[in-house]
Amino acid sequence: MRALSLLAVCLGLAAVATEKPHPCSKRQTGGGGGSFKGLEYPEGKIIAERFSYDTPSQQARVRALIVHHNQTSFVDLLLLYKEGVSYEISYPNQTCKKAPLKTPFRPIEIPPDAKLLGKMVLGTNSAPGMGGVLINSWAGAVPVLKAKYKLTFTEFGCLPISSQIHVENVGLILTSFYDLVIGIEDPNEFIPPPSCDKAELQQLENEELKDFLRFFI
């Protein structure tokens, strides 16, 4: 498993490090993330998730623990964008809900129109073995969603570090990424479990899922 810290070996390439950063996208990756939604209003949500996504195949898997108003819930979502379906899986109950997936696939990436704010080292390279990582910060806006964002990605590998997204009438969503893995560890990650074989297509009633998908994927 190639962890994020392995990117530090590239930092000795001074000539490469001085090149101008450019927007990028990672085709396949997985790892963990933590989100705090609603810093600017009282109804905040804390989300911890594990995710995998595959850009060429347009599919993603998200397992999330959501804490909201001192209530905890667990979500396991399989999102197959090319097929236009999503699965909400519950292993304890051996149930599976199948629903139409109408939103387009959006890879975790730096948008082409994002503006570079600057580059810096996460940690330090002042001494051998410190393992600092070169990162770039970007900013931009999505007018259709009335949202502004600030993203931080690694210079080498194009891996996400953090994101700050402010959405009008919603608030601020902060996300940190960790334990990232390049590639897909489990080839069965995007195969629905047997409990989904006979699931009938229906509309999901859980608005929490819609919020989660909108701001994470």
Image (cartoon, grey):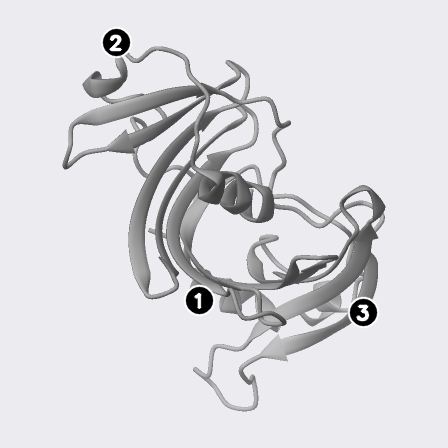
Residue at horizontal 78 percent and vertical 69 percent from the top: 18
| Quadrant of residue 90 within the rendered picture | top left
Residue at horizontal 56 percent and vertical 42 percent from the top: 217
Q: Is residue 139 above or below residue 49?
A: below
Q: Position of residue 92 (x, y in %)?
A: 14, 37
Residue 181 shows in the view: no
Q: Nearer the viewer, residue 202 or 130?
A: 202
Q: Nearer the viewer, residue 48 or 121?
A: 48
Q: Nearer the viewer, mark 1 or mark 2?
A: 2
Query: Badges 2 and 3: C-beta atoms under 8 Å apart?
Result: no
> Which residue in the structure is indicated by mark 1?
5
**The residue under label 3 is which amino acid type?**
Leu
As helix, strand or loop, the secondary structure at mark 1 comes to helix
As helix, strand or loop, the secondary structure at mark 3 comes to strand
**The residue under label 1 is which amino acid type?**
Ser
Residue at horizontal 35 percent and vertical 30 percent from the top: 88
As helix, strand or loop, the secondary structure at mark 2 comes to loop
> Which residue in the structure is indicated by mark 2?
198
Q: Nearer the viewer, mark 3 or mark 1?
A: 3
The circle on residue 117 is 3
